[in-house]
Image (cartoon, grey):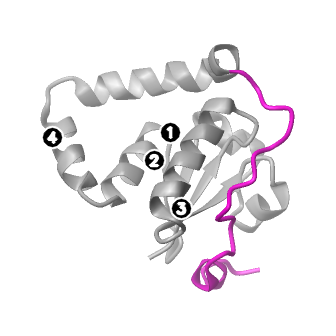
Amino acid sequence: MVYHIIYDGNCNLCATFTQLLAKFDQGNIFDYIPMQDQAILRQFNITPEDFEMGMILIDGDDIEKRWQGSDAAEEIVNLLPLGQAFIIAYRSLPGMKWLGDKSYEQVRDNRYNWFGRRDNTYPSPYPFGCNERSNSAVSN
């Protein structure tokens, strides 16, 4: 099971999130593609405009299966060990999904102002292609 996380490699918050997740997961579930890598994104038919709604999670076994924005964040947590229990509890609380979606939108739209912008794109230690199965799902 490999999932591709497309993140903003120039965003300090996004890079920190990617670093923490990569350290925890160690490439077992996820590999990472900065949205600035247009060559790889073209393999998934993703344009810069597609990224305006936030990070994207792609199922490496079925690249048509995608989540974006707060839905991607929730699915990432859901895929982690014990994450499913957290997501079930989160979704069962009235109004939490709405609050989470609105909070994600605010952070997404203000990420550079609130957390700063990196001078260089952050490269994950587990880039796209670090797992052979991740390349087999994309047809060139």
Amino acid, disc 3: Ile
Distance (Cα) linking label 3 and label 2? 9 Å
Circle 4 residue: 89
Q: Residue 131: which quarter of the image?
A: bottom right
Left or right: 81 as drawn, with respect to 71: left
Which of the marked residues, 2 or 4, is nearer the chain's N terminus?
Answer: 2
Identify the element where label 2 is drawn.
helix
The reply to whether discs 1 and 2 touch (Cβ–Cβ < 8 Å) is yes
Question: Is 69 located above or below residue 21 in the figure?
Answer: above
Residue 90: x %, y % from top left: 21, 36
Which mark is drawn over residue 69?
A: 1
Q: What residue appears at the point 50 percent right and 51 percent down from the top-left corner?
A: 21
Magenta stretch, main secondary structure class: loop
Q: Residue 140: which quarter of the image?
A: bottom right
The reply to whether discs 3 and 1 touch (Cβ–Cβ < 8 Å) is no
Question: Is 95 located above or below residue 140 in the figure?
Answer: above
Amino acid, disc 4: Ala
Q: The N terminus lies in which quarter of the figure?
A: bottom left
Circle 2 residue: 72
Distance (Cα) linking label 1 and label 2? 5 Å
